[in-house]
Protein backbone atom coordinates (compact mmCIF):
# COMPACT_ATOMS: atom_id res chain seq x y z
CA UNK A 1 0.00 0.00 0.00
CA UNK A 2 1.51 3.30 -1.03
CA UNK A 3 1.28 6.24 1.32
CA UNK A 4 0.53 9.72 0.01
CA UNK A 5 2.37 12.45 1.90
CA UNK A 6 1.00 15.95 1.94
CA UNK A 7 2.24 19.10 3.65
CA UNK A 8 -0.10 18.23 6.47
CA UNK A 9 1.09 14.65 7.06
CA UNK A 10 4.36 12.92 7.86
CA UNK A 11 5.63 9.50 8.82
CA UNK A 12 6.80 8.65 12.31
CA UNK A 13 9.30 5.79 12.20
CA UNK A 14 9.38 4.23 15.64
CA UNK A 15 12.01 1.79 16.88
CA UNK A 16 9.97 -0.78 18.78
CA UNK A 17 11.30 -3.47 21.05
CA UNK A 18 9.57 -5.80 23.49
CA UNK A 19 12.50 -5.98 25.90
CA UNK A 20 16.25 -5.54 26.20
CA UNK A 21 16.88 -9.26 25.54
CA UNK A 22 19.08 -10.06 22.52
CA UNK A 23 16.40 -12.43 21.16
CA UNK A 24 14.08 -9.44 20.86
CA UNK A 25 15.82 -7.07 18.46
CA UNK A 26 14.18 -3.75 17.70
CA UNK A 27 12.03 -3.36 14.61
CA UNK A 28 11.09 -0.11 12.93
CA UNK A 29 7.41 0.62 12.33
CA UNK A 30 6.19 3.57 10.30
CA UNK A 31 3.00 5.48 11.11
CA UNK A 32 1.42 8.22 9.00
CA UNK A 33 0.13 11.05 11.17
CA UNK A 34 -1.52 14.43 10.47
CA UNK A 35 0.40 17.59 11.38
CA UNK A 36 -1.39 20.16 13.48
CA UNK A 37 -0.23 23.65 14.44
CA UNK A 38 2.40 23.62 17.20
CA UNK A 39 2.63 19.83 17.14
CA UNK A 40 5.58 18.30 18.93
CA UNK A 41 7.09 14.84 18.57
CA UNK A 42 5.37 13.91 21.84
CA UNK A 43 2.03 15.00 20.35
CA UNK A 44 2.75 12.81 17.32
CA UNK A 45 3.55 9.85 19.56
CA UNK A 46 0.31 10.42 21.49
CA UNK A 47 -1.62 10.60 18.21
CA UNK A 48 -0.07 7.34 17.02
CA UNK A 49 -0.81 5.68 20.35
CA UNK A 50 -4.43 6.83 20.23
CA UNK A 51 -5.15 5.98 16.59
CA UNK A 52 -2.64 3.43 15.32
CA UNK A 53 -0.74 1.51 17.99
CA UNK A 54 -2.28 1.37 21.42
CA UNK A 55 0.55 -0.79 22.72
CA UNK A 56 3.25 1.78 21.93
CA UNK A 57 5.24 2.53 25.09
CA UNK A 58 6.89 5.85 25.84
CA UNK A 59 7.39 7.93 28.94
CA UNK A 60 6.09 11.46 29.47
CA UNK A 61 4.55 13.64 32.14
CA UNK A 62 4.60 17.46 32.17
CA UNK A 63 4.61 18.12 28.37
CA UNK A 64 6.49 21.38 28.94
CA UNK A 65 10.18 20.50 29.28
CA UNK A 66 10.27 20.48 33.06
CA UNK A 67 10.00 16.87 34.19
CA UNK A 68 12.61 15.37 31.83
CA UNK A 69 10.60 12.18 31.29
CA UNK A 70 10.23 12.19 27.50
CA UNK A 71 13.87 12.08 26.44
CA UNK A 72 14.27 9.99 23.27
CA UNK A 73 16.46 9.85 20.20
CA UNK A 74 14.86 11.99 17.46
CA UNK A 75 16.48 11.69 14.03
CA UNK A 76 19.63 10.48 15.77
CA UNK A 77 19.82 13.29 18.34
CA UNK A 78 18.88 12.97 22.01
CA UNK A 79 16.01 15.41 22.55
CA UNK A 80 12.97 15.97 24.71
CA UNK A 81 9.95 14.85 22.65
CA UNK A 82 7.76 17.56 24.21
CA UNK A 83 10.14 20.36 23.19
CA UNK A 84 10.81 19.25 19.62
CA UNK A 85 8.49 20.78 17.05
CA UNK A 86 7.55 18.58 14.10
CA UNK A 87 7.97 21.50 11.69
CA UNK A 88 11.53 22.06 12.92
CA UNK A 89 12.54 18.60 11.65
CA UNK A 90 13.49 18.09 8.03
CA UNK A 91 12.54 15.14 5.82
CA UNK A 92 9.30 13.24 5.22
CA UNK A 93 9.97 10.77 7.99
CA UNK A 94 10.85 11.38 11.61
CA UNK A 95 12.76 8.56 13.26
CA UNK A 96 12.39 8.06 17.00
CA UNK A 97 14.33 5.54 19.08
CA UNK A 98 15.02 4.88 22.76
CA UNK A 99 17.92 6.75 24.36
CA UNK A 100 21.27 5.06 23.73
CA UNK A 101 23.45 4.07 26.73
CA UNK A 102 20.31 3.04 28.64
CA UNK A 103 18.79 -0.48 28.73
CA UNK A 104 15.46 -0.65 26.90
CA UNK A 105 12.41 -1.63 28.93
CA UNK A 106 10.00 -1.52 26.01
CA UNK A 107 9.76 0.52 22.81
CA UNK A 108 10.95 4.04 23.74
CA UNK A 109 11.00 3.46 27.50
CA UNK A 110 14.47 3.05 29.00
CA UNK A 111 15.70 1.90 32.40
CA UNK A 112 17.07 4.73 34.58
CA UNK A 113 18.13 2.67 37.59
CA UNK A 114 21.87 2.91 36.83
CA UNK A 115 21.53 6.62 36.06
CA UNK A 116 19.86 7.31 39.40
CA UNK A 117 22.33 5.14 41.31
CA UNK A 118 25.22 7.17 39.87
CA UNK A 119 23.38 10.34 40.87
CA UNK A 120 22.95 8.97 44.40
CA UNK A 121 26.62 7.95 44.47
CA UNK A 122 27.80 11.58 44.50
CA UNK A 123 25.53 12.39 47.48
CA UNK A 124 23.54 15.13 45.69
CA UNK A 125 22.46 17.05 48.79
CA UNK A 126 23.97 19.60 51.14
CA UNK A 127 26.26 18.03 53.71
CA UNK A 128 27.07 19.93 56.90
CA UNK A 129 29.54 18.95 59.58
CA UNK A 130 26.86 19.75 62.13
CA UNK A 131 23.56 18.59 60.57
CA UNK A 132 21.49 19.93 63.49
CA UNK A 133 22.29 23.58 62.68
CA UNK A 134 20.62 23.38 59.25
CA UNK A 135 17.27 23.09 60.96
CA UNK A 136 18.00 25.92 63.35
CA UNK A 137 19.15 28.75 61.09
CA UNK A 138 19.27 29.84 57.46
CA UNK A 139 22.49 29.26 55.57
CA UNK A 140 22.99 32.60 53.89
CA UNK A 141 25.06 33.18 50.77
CA UNK A 142 25.79 36.10 48.51
CA UNK A 143 24.59 36.50 44.93
CA UNK A 144 28.14 35.88 43.74
CA UNK A 145 28.32 32.62 45.68
CA UNK A 146 25.00 31.53 44.19
CA UNK A 147 26.08 32.28 40.62
CA UNK A 148 29.02 29.88 40.93
CA UNK A 149 26.66 26.92 40.75
CA UNK A 150 23.34 28.37 39.58
CA UNK A 151 23.31 27.08 35.98
CA UNK A 152 24.00 23.56 37.20
CA UNK A 153 20.84 23.56 39.31
CA UNK A 154 18.84 23.69 36.06
CA UNK A 155 19.38 19.98 35.49
CA UNK A 156 16.07 18.12 35.15
CA UNK A 157 17.69 14.66 35.13
CA UNK A 158 16.35 13.80 31.68
CA UNK A 159 19.44 11.71 30.92
CA UNK A 160 20.10 13.26 27.49
CA UNK A 161 23.67 14.15 28.46
CA UNK A 162 24.40 10.56 29.47
CA UNK A 163 22.77 9.32 26.26
CA UNK A 164 25.05 11.60 24.22
CA UNK A 165 28.24 10.78 26.13
CA UNK A 166 30.58 8.35 24.32
CA UNK A 167 32.27 7.34 27.59
CA UNK A 168 28.99 6.34 29.25
CA UNK A 169 28.50 4.06 26.25
CA UNK A 170 31.70 2.11 26.84
CA UNK A 171 32.36 2.42 30.59
CA UNK A 172 29.46 1.26 32.76
CA UNK A 173 31.20 2.44 35.93
CA UNK A 174 31.74 5.99 34.66
CA UNK A 175 29.61 8.30 36.79
CA UNK A 176 28.50 10.24 33.74
CA UNK A 177 28.03 13.95 33.01
CA UNK A 178 24.79 14.34 34.98
CA UNK A 179 26.14 12.98 38.28
CA UNK A 180 29.49 14.74 37.90
CA UNK A 181 27.76 18.05 37.18
CA UNK A 182 25.74 17.72 40.36
CA UNK A 183 28.91 16.86 42.26
CA UNK A 184 30.48 20.08 40.99
CA UNK A 185 27.31 22.05 41.74
CA UNK A 186 27.65 21.03 45.41
CA UNK A 187 31.44 21.31 45.48
CA UNK A 188 31.21 25.06 44.78
CA UNK A 189 28.18 25.69 46.97
CA UNK A 190 29.35 27.82 49.90
CA UNK A 191 26.87 26.06 52.20
CA UNK A 192 28.21 22.56 51.53
CA UNK A 193 30.89 20.89 53.65
CA UNK A 194 30.84 17.43 52.10
CA UNK A 195 33.81 17.63 49.76
CA UNK A 196 35.96 15.21 51.75
CA UNK A 197 33.17 12.61 51.61
CA UNK A 198 32.54 13.01 47.90
CA UNK A 199 36.12 13.37 46.73
CA UNK A 200 36.96 9.66 46.88
CA UNK A 201 34.27 8.74 44.34
CA UNK A 202 35.13 11.67 42.06
CA UNK A 203 38.92 11.32 42.01
CA UNK A 204 38.95 8.08 40.00
CA UNK A 205 39.30 7.08 36.37
CA UNK A 206 35.56 6.32 36.44
CA UNK A 207 34.87 9.68 38.08
CA UNK A 208 35.80 13.08 36.70
CA UNK A 209 39.00 11.73 35.08
CA UNK A 210 36.94 9.46 32.81
CA UNK A 211 35.74 12.49 30.82
CA UNK A 212 37.54 12.93 27.49
CA UNK A 213 35.91 16.30 26.79
CA UNK A 214 33.88 15.19 23.79
CA UNK A 215 31.43 17.94 24.73
CA UNK A 216 28.37 16.11 23.39
CA UNK A 217 26.70 16.30 26.82
CA UNK A 218 26.63 20.09 26.68
CA UNK A 219 25.29 20.07 23.13
CA UNK A 220 22.48 17.69 24.12
CA UNK A 221 21.30 19.42 27.30
CA UNK A 222 17.81 20.89 26.73
CA UNK A 223 18.12 23.26 29.68
CA UNK A 224 21.36 24.99 28.67
CA UNK A 225 23.44 23.37 31.38
CA UNK A 226 27.09 22.85 30.42
CA UNK A 227 28.11 19.51 31.97
CA UNK A 228 31.42 19.40 30.07
CA UNK A 229 32.40 22.71 31.69
CA UNK A 230 31.34 21.44 35.12
CA UNK A 231 33.48 18.32 34.75
CA UNK A 232 36.56 20.29 33.67
CA UNK A 233 36.07 22.67 36.62
CA UNK A 234 35.65 19.63 38.85
CA UNK A 235 38.98 18.26 37.58
CA UNK A 236 40.62 21.57 38.40
CA UNK A 237 39.05 21.57 41.83
CA UNK A 238 40.29 18.03 42.52
CA UNK A 239 43.81 19.03 41.44
CA UNK A 240 43.80 22.28 43.43
CA UNK A 241 42.62 20.44 46.52
CA UNK A 242 45.36 17.94 45.79
CA UNK A 243 47.95 20.72 45.89
CA UNK A 244 46.49 22.18 49.08
CA UNK A 245 46.15 18.92 50.97
CA UNK A 246 49.56 17.44 50.29
CA UNK B 1 45.60 2.80 41.62
CA UNK B 2 45.38 -0.90 42.28
CA UNK B 3 47.00 -1.72 45.59
CA UNK B 4 49.19 1.40 45.59
CA UNK B 5 46.30 3.53 46.88
CA UNK B 6 47.13 6.59 44.77
CA UNK B 7 44.33 8.95 43.82
CA UNK B 8 43.73 9.34 40.11
CA UNK B 9 44.56 13.04 40.46
CA UNK B 10 48.10 12.07 41.53
CA UNK B 11 48.57 10.06 38.35
CA UNK B 12 46.97 12.80 36.27
CA UNK B 13 49.19 15.46 37.82
CA UNK B 14 52.28 13.38 37.06
CA UNK B 15 50.92 12.96 33.53
CA UNK B 16 50.68 16.74 33.10
CA UNK B 17 54.25 17.11 34.37
CA UNK B 18 55.42 14.44 31.93
CA UNK B 19 53.68 16.25 29.05
CA UNK B 20 55.56 19.43 30.04
CA UNK B 21 58.78 17.43 30.19
CA UNK B 22 58.18 16.01 26.69
CA UNK B 23 57.41 19.48 25.32
CA UNK B 24 60.80 20.66 26.54
CA UNK B 25 62.87 17.54 25.86
CA UNK B 26 61.56 16.65 22.39
CA UNK B 27 62.50 19.93 20.63
CA UNK B 28 65.93 19.80 22.28
CA UNK B 29 66.33 16.21 21.11
CA UNK B 30 65.49 17.20 17.53
CA UNK B 31 67.77 20.21 17.80
CA UNK B 32 70.74 18.00 18.67
CA UNK B 33 70.16 16.18 15.37
CA UNK B 34 69.63 19.29 13.31
CA UNK B 35 71.91 22.14 14.31
CA UNK B 36 73.37 21.80 17.81
CA UNK B 37 76.96 20.63 17.33
CA UNK B 38 76.33 18.83 14.02
CA UNK B 39 76.66 19.85 10.38
CA UNK B 40 73.71 17.77 9.15
CA UNK B 41 71.15 15.22 10.26
CA UNK B 42 72.96 12.46 8.31
CA UNK B 43 76.18 13.29 10.13
CA UNK B 44 74.35 13.24 13.48
CA UNK B 45 73.27 9.66 12.84
CA UNK B 46 76.77 8.23 12.32
CA UNK B 47 78.02 5.82 14.99
CA UNK B 48 80.75 8.10 16.31
CA UNK B 49 78.37 11.04 16.52
CA UNK B 50 75.75 9.02 18.41
CA UNK B 51 78.27 7.54 20.86
CA UNK B 52 79.87 10.95 21.26
CA UNK B 53 76.57 12.47 22.30
CA UNK B 54 75.93 9.61 24.72
CA UNK B 55 79.18 10.51 26.47
CA UNK B 56 77.84 14.02 27.13
CA UNK B 57 75.95 14.07 30.43
CA UNK B 58 73.43 16.70 29.21
CA UNK B 59 72.38 14.43 26.32
CA UNK B 60 72.09 11.43 28.61
CA UNK B 61 69.82 13.36 30.99
CA UNK B 62 67.79 14.58 28.02
CA UNK B 63 67.33 11.07 26.63
CA UNK B 64 66.47 9.62 30.03
CA UNK B 65 63.92 12.40 30.58
CA UNK B 66 62.40 11.83 27.16
CA UNK B 67 62.21 8.08 27.74
CA UNK B 68 60.57 8.54 31.14
CA UNK B 69 58.11 11.18 29.95
CA UNK B 70 57.07 9.38 26.77
CA UNK B 71 56.75 6.01 28.52
CA UNK B 72 54.59 7.40 31.32
CA UNK B 73 52.42 9.49 29.02
CA UNK B 74 51.89 6.65 26.54
CA UNK B 75 51.23 3.97 29.12
CA UNK B 76 48.92 6.22 31.14
CA UNK B 77 46.85 6.84 27.99
CA UNK B 78 46.84 3.12 27.18
CA UNK B 79 45.65 2.36 30.71
CA UNK B 80 42.72 4.75 30.36
CA UNK B 81 41.73 3.17 27.05
CA UNK B 82 41.94 -0.35 28.50
CA UNK B 83 39.90 0.63 31.55
CA UNK B 84 37.10 1.67 29.22
CA UNK B 85 37.12 -1.69 27.44
CA UNK B 86 35.72 -3.60 30.40
CA UNK B 87 34.63 -2.84 33.95
CA UNK B 88 35.03 -4.11 37.48
CA UNK B 89 37.60 -3.73 40.24
CA UNK B 90 39.39 -6.90 39.15
CA UNK B 91 39.83 -5.60 35.60
CA UNK B 92 41.01 -2.21 36.92
CA UNK B 93 43.60 -3.90 39.10
CA UNK B 94 44.83 -6.24 36.35
CA UNK B 95 45.17 -3.39 33.84
CA UNK B 96 46.93 -1.08 36.29
CA UNK B 97 49.36 -3.72 37.47
CA UNK B 98 50.01 -4.78 33.87
CA UNK B 99 50.73 -1.19 32.88
CA UNK B 100 53.05 -0.70 35.88
CA UNK B 101 54.92 -3.88 34.92
CA UNK B 102 55.16 -2.75 31.29
CA UNK B 103 56.46 0.65 32.46
CA UNK B 104 59.13 -0.93 34.65
CA UNK B 105 60.22 -3.16 31.74
CA UNK B 106 60.32 -0.28 29.26
CA UNK B 107 62.22 2.05 31.58
CA UNK B 108 64.55 -0.72 32.72
CA UNK B 109 65.39 -1.72 29.17
CA UNK B 110 65.70 1.85 27.89
CA UNK B 111 67.78 3.13 30.79
CA UNK B 112 70.05 0.07 30.69
CA UNK B 113 70.65 0.76 26.99
CA UNK B 114 71.62 4.34 27.80
CA UNK B 115 73.90 3.19 30.63
CA UNK B 116 75.59 0.62 28.38
CA UNK B 117 76.18 3.30 25.74
CA UNK B 118 77.53 5.76 28.31
CA UNK B 119 79.89 3.33 30.02
CA UNK B 120 80.81 1.50 26.82
CA UNK B 121 80.43 -1.88 28.54
Image (cartoon, coloured by chain):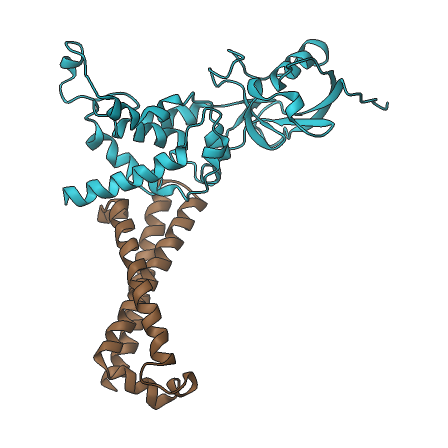
Chain colours: A cyan, B brown
Residue A103 is at least partly visible in this image: yes
- Closer to the camera, A146 or B55? A146
Give me the residue at 41% from left, 85% from top.
B40
Residue B77 in percent (x, y) is at 38, 54
Number of marks present in the image shown: 0
Give me the residue at 27% from left, 47% from top.
B1
Looking at the picture, does residue A190 appear above or below residue A56?
Answer: below
Left or right: residue A79 versus residue A161 is right
Residue B121 is at least partly visible in this image: no
Left or right: residue A25 versus residue A128 is right
Of all residues, the one furthest to the bottom in this rendering is: B48
- Closer to the camera, A211 or A155? A155
Left or right: residue A107 versus residue B68 is right
Q: Quadrant of residue A120?
A: top left
- Closer to the camera, B84 or A152? A152
- Closer to the camera, B7 or B70? B70
Residue A235 in percent (x, y) is at 30, 41
Of all residues, the one furthest to the right in this rendering is: A1
Give me the residue at 25% from left, 31% from top.
A198
Residue A148 in percent (x, y) is at 29, 28
Looking at the picture, does residue A157 appear above or below residue A220?
Answer: above
Q: Quadrant where the C terminus of chain B lies?
A: bottom left
Residue A180 in percent (x, y) is at 35, 32
Amino acid sequence: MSVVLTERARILRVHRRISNEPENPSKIMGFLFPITKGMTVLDALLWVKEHKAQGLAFRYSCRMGICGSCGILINGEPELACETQITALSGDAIEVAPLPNFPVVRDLVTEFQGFFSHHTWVMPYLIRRNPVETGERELLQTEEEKLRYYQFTMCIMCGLCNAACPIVGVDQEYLGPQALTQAYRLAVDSRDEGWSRRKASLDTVHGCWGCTVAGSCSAACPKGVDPALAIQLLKRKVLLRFARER
Amino acid sequence: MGGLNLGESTLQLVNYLMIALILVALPLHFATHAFLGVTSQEESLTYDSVIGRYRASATVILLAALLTGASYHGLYGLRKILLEVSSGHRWDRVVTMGIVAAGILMLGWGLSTIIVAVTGT
